[in-house]
Structures are given as structure tokens and as C-alpha cells.
Image (cartoon, helix red, strand yellow):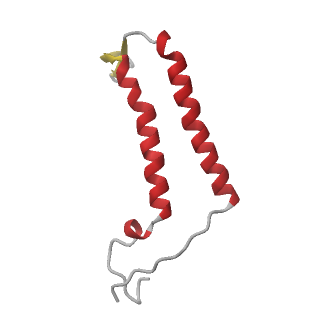
């Protein structure tokens, strides 16, 4: 029995609301990022030691990665939610475990 069960999942209202909140958070953080861009110093701390002192510094352009990473994570999780069976059924299915 090598066929994996494919179940059509419908989204609830609360899931739709959470999707909208996620999109709003990404948009709001990106807008805030661009509004604060001119006020950022050229060099910002990117690493701290165990006492809380900055011991790594980088350009302010490294901060551009934060909204990009958030957007990529959101898109990846949406894609996994649309088709969860390739991720959730990594092992072969049988009548005992499906």
C-alpha cells in the first residue's frame, strides 16, 4: 500500500483571521523598517557576548534580511499547509499507520 492518503482540508474563519494578521504583521514591520531606515546608524550591533556587551558589528544593510526572512517563512508555511502530505508522510503508508 504505497499510496498516501490525500485529504482536502478546509480553512476555518479563525485560520483566515490569523492569515490576515500574519500578512498585516509582515506589511507593518516592513513599512516601519523603511520609515526608520534614515534614522539607523551606519553600523549596528549584530552579536552580543554573555554579559550583554556588543562584540559584533555590521552594516545597517544586514537588517534588510529580517523582513525577507519573515516573508520567506510565511510563504513556506503557507505552501506546507496547502499540501501537507509530502512533509507529513515521509515514511511509507500501510493499513497499520495511515
At x 38%, y 17%, the residue is 60
Could you tell whether 35 is left or right of 93 in the image?
A: right
Q: Position of residue 67 (x, y in %)?
A: 46, 33
* Displayed quadrant of residue 47: top left
Image height of 22 relative to 44, above or below: below
Image height of 78 relative to 50, above or below: below
Q: Where is residue 52 in the image (x, y as percent from the top left)?
A: 39, 19
Image height of 51 relative to 42, above or below: below
Could you tell whether 29 is left or right of 70 in the image?
A: right
Q: Where is residue 78 in the image (x, y as percent from the top left)?
A: 49, 54
* Displayed quadrant of residue 83: bottom left
* Displayed quadrant of residue 62: top left
Count how many numbered circles sit on residues in the image: 0
At x 56%, y 34%, the residue is 27
At x 37%, y 10%, the residue is 42
At x 42%, y 31%, the residue is 66
| Image quadrant containing the N terminus | bottom left
| Image quadrant containing the C terminus | bottom left
In the displayed orientation, state which residue is furthest to the right.
13
Could you tell whether 89 is left or right of 37 in the image?
A: left
Amino acid at each position: 500500500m504505497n499510496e498516501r492518503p490525500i485529504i482536502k482540508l478546509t480553512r476555518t474563519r479563525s485560520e483566515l483571521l490569523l492569515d490576515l494578521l500574519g500578512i498585516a504583521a509582515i506589511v507593518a514591520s516592513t513599512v516601519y523598517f523603511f520609515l526608520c531606515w534614515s534614522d539607523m546608524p551606519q553600523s549596528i550591533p549584530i552579536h552580543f557576548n554573555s554579559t550583554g556587551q556588543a562584540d559584533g558589528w555590521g552594516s545597517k544593510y544586514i537588517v534588510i534580511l529580517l523582513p525577507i526572512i519573515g516573508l520567506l517563512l510565511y510563504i513556506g508555511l503557507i505552501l506546507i499547509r496547502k499540501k501537507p502530505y509530502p512533509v507529513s508522510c515521509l515514511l511509507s503508508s500501510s493499513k497499520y499507520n495511515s
